[in-house]
Every structure is written in C-alpha cells, then in structure tokens.
Image (cartoon, rainbow, N blue to C red):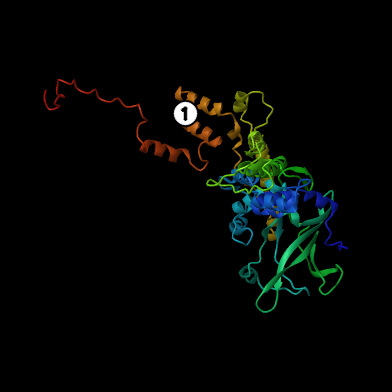
Amino acid sequence: MVHPVRKQSTEAAALNKHCALIDALLGGTDAMRAAGKAYLPQWPGEEDKAHATRLAVATLFPAYQRTIEVLGAKPFSKPITYGKDVPAKIQALCEDVDRQGRNLHAFLAEVGQEALGYGFSGILVDYPPTKDENGKPLYVTKADEDAAGVRPYFVQIHPRCILGWLSDKSGLTQLRLLEAVEVPDGDFDVKTIEQVRVLRRGAWETWRKVENKSDDEWAPFESGVTTLKGIPFVPVYGNRLGFMRARPALLELAYANVEHWQSKSDQQNILHVARVPILFTKMLGDGVELAVGAGTGVKATNPDADMKFVEHTGAAIEAGRKSILDIEDRMRQAGAELLVIKPGNITESQTLADNEQGACALQKVAENIEDSADQALQLMAEWLGEQQGGHVTLFKDFGAATLAEASAELLLKTNQAGKLSDESLHEEFQRRGIVKPDIDWETEKERIERQGPAPGTMDDPLPPPANKPAPNPDEE
C-alpha cells in the first residue's frame, strides 16, 4: 500500500494523464520503441517475434517535438524586457535565476516549452535554509549568507513531480512535490532516492522512505518555517482548464504523431513484403529438386507443371503512402493553428486594419508565461523584503506570421506603388517571420546601401556602331 504522503491524488493524476505519451514523443525513436505495444500494438495473429522485429526497425517522424521547439521558441526570439519597476537587486539575481547558470530568459524559455508540450509547468521560488533542525542560525552575518549563496532562486517543476495539493479561495494551502535527491553511497559514490516535499503556508517539511522496512513506510526527514504567508509556487499553463488543471495545447497533434508512427510501421512492413516475391510452383512432382538462381533451371516431367513468382501489385503501397502524407498534412495544420489569429474579423484586410494582438493561441500562452513570471518575481521580492518584483514582457508580435502569403505580396505591391515606406515594409515582413526578428531597420538599410543599386535600375551606355569607333572624350 502506498503511503499517503507518496500517493498521487486523483487531481494530480488527471494533470499527468498525457505525460507518458508526451514523454515518448519528445524522447524520439528510442523512447517510442521502449514503449513497446503501448503505441505500436501487436495485431491479432501476429507472432511475438514478428512484432519485435517490426518494432525494432520502426522510426519516429518527430513532428510533435519539432513543432514544440519551433513554436516554443517564438516568444523568446527576442530577449525578455524588464520593466522599470523591477528592482535592480532582483534583476541582478535574474542573471542566474536558478543558481544553475540560467538567466531568466533561458529559464522561462524552457518552462514555456514544457508548458506548451505538457500543458503545464511550474515555478517554485525556493530559499535555502538559514537555520538548523534545532532552530540555530547557520550564518552569523548577512555577508556570510551572501558568501554561501543564500538567496531566493527559481526551480522548474515538471507536472510529473506534482503528487497532490489542497486549496481554498485564497489559493494553495498544501502542495506535495516528488523530488530525486542524491545521498552518499559509501566513500566514493552517491545514489538517488525519492523524497517528498510538503509545502504549507509558512512552513515546509520533507519526507523520506524508512530504510530496512518491508512495507512502504515514510517518515518526516527535515522541516522548517518560512517568512512567506503563502506557498511560493506559481503554475504555468499551456492550455488552462482551471486552477491547477490543464491539458497539452497540441494533444491532437500528439495523437496524429502516434498514428503516423503506426502507419509508417505498416508501410515499412508491406514494402518489405512487396520487395521479396514469393515463388509459386504447381505440380512439379515429388522428385524435382529446386535450385533458384540465375545459372540454374528446373525440369519438370508433368506437362501441367507451372512455376512463377507472385509479386505484390503495389496498389496498397501507394494507398499507404498517400495516407502517411495526409497525416503529415494534418500534423502541420494542427501546429499552425496555434498561430492563426482569431479576433473574429471576417476578412484578412480587416485583420490587418484592426491589428489585434494576443489573438492567437500561442500569444495567449506567451501571456500566461509572462503573468507567471511576474508572480514569481513578486515572490522573490517577498523573500528579499522588497515591495514589488516588477514586470517582464515577452515578444508576442508574431501573430501575423500566419496570414496568407497574399498579404505579404499585397504589402510589397503597396510599397512599390509608393504608398508604404520601406521601413514599414521591413516591420511587416518581420511580423510575418519573413525577416529575422533580430534584424533592425537601420542595420538592414546599411546592408541595402552596401549591395548597390538593384538589378535593372541603371542604364547601360549604348554600344558604338559596328563601323564607327567610340567617341574620344578628350576631343571637342
């Protein structure tokens, strides 16, 4: 029986419902093969050895992984912007916000990708203990604390690490997190054990399994109090369903990727069968010896005897190929839908005119990350005794990237007609992802000037007549 402190709650299990699927897809071919029959079923009548062979040669088309990487990187294609209300002390800590070398930009980029891929991630704003188990201070002066690196820092929390929580109208009242900690194992090695961290308002404790016990017995290991009134945890939603409830924003793409994995395996199997023709013989007689090869022959005495190769017509191969291409198209569409602007405008020209921001799903994800970052900075400020943590801004001007290609052509024609400046054209192309977001207009203008006149804009001098020498410019 699982100890209550280690047991995953029903709500946490729902939050983690799709983690195994996403883990396998993000893990690539190796992870999908390791999942075995979970995502590549064994068909009725298929022998174990045949299924094992089919699984061993299957390869994953990494559509889900690539889509998460590409879309997750868009809000971070430009550095995050710190507001003027972010205290200098906090901004300095953000250069190594997790005490592992990541600055706030890099940290949020990984949290954002996790939230986009799994639907949920979390930020724990932790603080090292300053007192021992007896309540005695570990450090004498503030300088001692600074030298030991005692300061608030961010910890990225994967949804798999969440075992359960309790809450009221004010938010979380308890949060249980599963941790993996390294402990000494002899004089020269370490081992990893499980630990459950229980966070309460104004207090915390850790639990570990009691060694040398046959049953699943856990006991408190460490405990302490905090100066915060709440639990320093901030949820980050990729697709929010409610408080501490979410699902992957691209779940249908994940299912389609599994369908592609299965269909591609079937296609590989039928290609193998089609490439190896079957030798069919009829009424050769019992005494006929078969030796198949270019320099051999078969002689039969029975006039009704027959022998031929039976080959696949290839019709099913073409049908399978088209099916796979259809799945790939659906996967591309599922990923692109996060970029589609949905402001309710009827026409593309209205969308351009209204210029509504934050209207596509990915922009909303970026706003969620932005809001969570602000909450985490505020918790950091509370640890430090600051009044406010301030605000940060992510790059979100990428919604227009999914407008029809005709809109880019329309902009170019408008520019050529003298109705739109070159700088505005550059900005609009940048919004659509045609021009890299890190190239500013002044740099681009210098590049244009260095490359010289555009082809066809200079008049070439007329060649002299064939029977007349070119004029001498020194002659009057």
Residue 119 in the image: state x and y as whole percent: 72, 46
For the point 47% across and 33% down, which residue is it? 423
Q: Residue furthest bottom?
A: 187
Residue 364, by quadrant, is top right
Residue 70, by quadrant, is top right
Q: Between residues 80 and 250, which one lies in front from this camera angle?
A: 250
| Visible residue check, residue 252 | yes
Residue 63 in the image: state x and y as whole percent: 63, 43
- In the rendered view, would you say 468 is above or below 359? above
Q: Is residue 415 left or right of residue 330?
A: left
For the point 81% across and 73% down, which residue is it? 211
Q: Amino acid under label 1?
A: Ser
Identify the image quadrant of the C terminus: top left
Q: At numbered mark 1, what does the secondary structure look like: helix, strand or loop?
A: loop
- In the rendered view, would you say 151 is above or below 337? below
Q: Is residue 313 left or right of residue 456?
A: right
Disc 1 crowd, CA 10 A, few/some/many (<14, 14-19, 20+): few
For the point 49% across and 27% down, which residue is it? 412
Residue 405 in the image: state x and y as whole percent: 55, 29
Q: Between residues 467 and 422, which one lies in front from this camera angle?
A: 467
Q: Between residues 94 and 325, which one lies in front from this camera angle?
A: 325
Q: Residue furthest front?
A: 301
Q: Which residue is mark 1?
A: 421
Residue 5 in the image: state x and y as whole percent: 84, 62
- In the rendered view, would you say 5 is above or below 443? below
Q: Between residues 80 and 65, which one lies in front from this camera angle?
A: 65
- In the rendered view, would you say 405 is above or below 335? above
Identify the image quadrant of the N terminus: bottom right
Q: Residue furthest left?
A: 475
How many marks on residues? 1
